[in-house]
Amino acid sequence: MIEAEFFRENGAYTGFAVSGHAGFDQHGRDIVCASVSSAVQLTVNGITEILSERADIKVKENLVKLSLKDGPSRETNAFFKALKLHLELLCEDYPGTIHISCMEV
């Protein structure tokens, strides 16, 4: 199962961590993993390259974590909300493949 955790401060998103595998299909053929990976990459690139926001990014086997260095903004919040919505819709379409949680920091 993919674990997606979103971090919030005073209700605004400050980062996320996504880890694991969906287990929907075999490695290299799992459309849920591919969808999540693509959405995570889009979010990271949108925040760091398009918005030029400073962020700590950790990429390891089965883990991508992003934490904003300078705090949330309206624009970064939109990217985080879009990622969370995308993952929620994937949860509906592919039950048991993704677990989403939010933590106030």
Image (cartoon, rainbow, N blue to C red):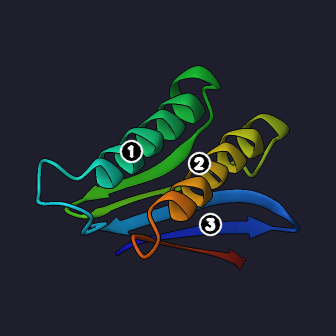
Looking at the image, which is closer to me, 6 or 54?
A: 6
Q: Can residue 68 be seen in this snapshot?
A: no
Please state which amino acid type lies under the numbered disc 3.
Phe
Q: Quadrant of residue 15?
A: bottom right
Work out how far the residue at label 2 is from the one at label 3, CA to CA, in angstroms. Answer: 13 Å
* Residue 102 x/y as whole percent: 67, 74
Q: Are marks 3 and 1 in contact (CB under 8 Å)?
A: no
* Residue 20 x/y as whole percent: 30, 70
Q: Which residue sits furthest top?
A: 50
Q: What numbered label is drawn on residue 6?
A: 3
Please state which amino acid type lies under the numbered disc 2.
His
Residue 6 is left or right of residue 105, and the answer is left
Q: Residue at x 22, y 53 (%)?
A: 30
* Residue 93 x/y as whole percent: 51, 58
Q: How many marks?
A: 3
Please state which amino acid type lies under the numbered disc 1.
Ser
Q: Can residue 18 be seen in this snapshot?
A: yes
Q: Quadrant of the C terminus?
A: bottom right
Q: Quickly name the residue at label 1.
A: 35
* Residue 24 x/y as whole percent: 27, 64
Q: Quickly name the residue at label 2.
A: 86
Upstream in sequence: badge 3 or badge 1 = 3
Q: Residue at x 61, y 60 (%)?
A: 88
